[in-house]
Amino acid sequence: MVKLALELLASCAGCEVSILDLHEDLIDVLEQAELVYAPILMDVKEIPEDIDIAIVSGSVRNEENKERLEEIREKAKTVIAYGTCACYGGITCMADLYSPEDVSARSFSDNPSTESSEQPSEVVPKLLPIVHPAGDMAEIDYYIPGCPPKENLIKDVLVPLIAGEIPEIPKKSVCADCNRTMEHIEFDKIHRRIEGEPDQEKCFLSQGYVCLGSVTLGRCGALCSAAGVPCHGCGGPSMDILREPSHDVYNCVINRIAHISKMPHKDVEKQLYDIGHIVYGFVIGSTIMEDKKVSLIPQLIKK
């Protein structure tokens, strides 16, 4: 029987909950695999030897995260970076917009919602200078981004792996699953997501809203756009962004808005505020994205 392990790093545990979303299909998985390590589900302190498949979620925020990732990589035959935090840093890496000292102060001494106290110095893992995706700190065999990944994708990838087969992984963007209609309409104003009431039939970009569907890997079924919410990019960069050195989330979004609206590129850029959160929010910690010559991430992060 296949030995399966779940390792939770710096994360919200939503990825682990998403595995439970398999519902009855989870029974089929557990008939073929034995869950030997999952601290979030069982009282187990040590990572066992000879793990067949390790599913790692979350980013590497502190020294303990780093040590646990390295150990499970050493003891597992196959490691899956599960969720956008593990693959590209996710929202955890937005802490890179600030220094570790600022982050700690916000948590312990300068937080208006809690009573100020000194930062604990005992039994508290040291923060790393920046947050890292698991994929930047250890060799990864499979990447399954998503915040969290959808249950159908888990089934399509995890079940074949357990059976010793090579899974087929979709490579299209979110736009491929979106039913909205794109139109080339001249406009000169970019709207915030909270402004106005966008047309439910038209593409968000065609209405002047920043939507990252065209630059985001589409394994979610375009659920947000169907619900009237522009894509935030939680699935990580699309394949063309990853493959092309000259393609970046930021410049591709600027190009698409300028093309649809006929606005000059510089006018589009002037209206985009806080790009660390709005454009790079889920990938700002990724070395893959930071190393692109056209990327603005190096200008944003505080090392």
Image (cartoon, rainbow, N blue to C red):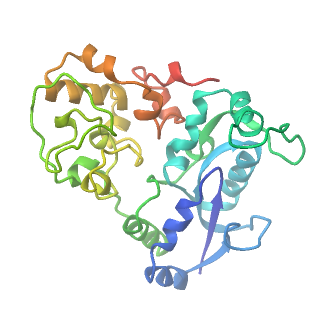
For the C terminus, which image quadrant?
top right
Q: Which of the 4 quarters of the picture holds residue 242?
A: top left
x and y, in percent, of residue 283 in the image: 47, 38
Residue 220: image location, x then y, percent: 34, 57
Apparent side of residue 145 relative to residue 42 in the rendered image (left or right): left
Q: Is residue 177 left or right of residue 145?
A: left
At horizontal 73% and vertical 67% (from top left) the residue drawn is: 49
Q: Is residue 285 left or right of residue 264?
A: right
Relative image position of residue 5 (x, y in whole percent): 63, 67
Whether residue 248 can be seen here = no
- Specify the farthest residue to the right: 122
Q: Position of residue 113 (x, y in %)?
A: 68, 42
Residue drawn at x 67%, y 67% as measured from the top left: 40
Nearer to me, 66 or 257: 257
Q: Is residue 241 visible?
A: yes
Place residue 149 in its image quadrant.
bottom left
Q: Where is 257 relative to 31, above or below?
A: above
Left or right position of 87 against 250: right
Q: Residue at x 42, y 23 (%)?
A: 295
**Above or below, 197 relative to 158:** above
The quarter of the displayed image where residue 77 is located: bottom right
* In this view, 293 is above or below 196: above
Front one among 194 and 225: 194
Q: Residue at x 63, y 37 (%)?
A: 131
The answer to which of 89 and 181 lies nearer the viewer is 181
187 relative to 54, above or below: above
